[in-house]
Image: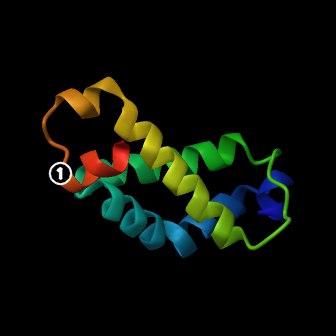
Amino acid sequence: MSRLAADDSAALEAIMNRYERTVLNTSYRFLGDAQWAEEVAQDVFVSIYQQRHRYQSRGRFSTWLFRFVKNRTSIFLLTPESASSGRLTSNAKKKAR
């Protein structure tokens, strides 16, 4: 992450290669929908890039990333489109409350 904060162009690709599956799986566990999990994962990596200068390495990157994914998934669940589409599983609806 420090390489990404220093504008190393290969750093985001390295982060994505290492954590893409973890981000997708975590998103899927919360959402229960593979397509929406992919949307959240894409949003996570775009947001990581946009906020790269705000990251502070106080702990493990993976812990920060998990929290980031959880927060992005929660935001996604609260959007009117996801709530009104009827595509959310009952498990995801419970987690949104």
The answer to which quarter of the image holds residue 18 is bottom right
Residue 80's place in the image compared with 87, above or below, is above
The image's colouring method is rainbow
Tell me the residue at 62%/67% (across/down).
Answer: 15
Tell me the residue at 46%/64% (across/down).
Answer: 23
Label 1 crowd (10 A; few <14 / some 14-19 / many >=20): few
**Where does the image place residue 13, in percent across and percent down from the top left?**
60, 63
Q: Is residue 90 left or right of residue 49?
A: left
- Residue beneath disc 1: 89
**Where does the image place residue 12, in percent across and percent down from the top left?**
65, 59
**Where does the image place residue 25, in percent across and percent down from the top left?**
37, 69
**Where does the image place residue 9, in percent across and percent down from the top left?**
72, 55
Q: Residue furthest left?
A: 86
Q: Secondary structure at mark 1?
A: loop
Q: Is residue 44 left or right of residue 40?
A: right
Tell me the residue at 50%/45% (across/down).
Answer: 72
Q: Is residue 52 left or right of residue 30?
A: right
In the rendered image, the quadrant that contains the C terminus is: top left
| Closer to the camera in the image, 79 or 48 | 79
The answer to which quarter of the image holds residue 31 is bottom left
Q: Is residue 4 left or right of residue 45?
A: right
Residue 54's place in the image compared with 68, above or below, is above
In the rendered image, the quadrant that contains the N terminus is: bottom right
Q: How many numbered tags mark residues here?
A: 1
**Of the residues shown, which amino acid type is indicated by label 1?**
Thr
Tell me the residue at 36%/29% (across/down).
Answer: 79
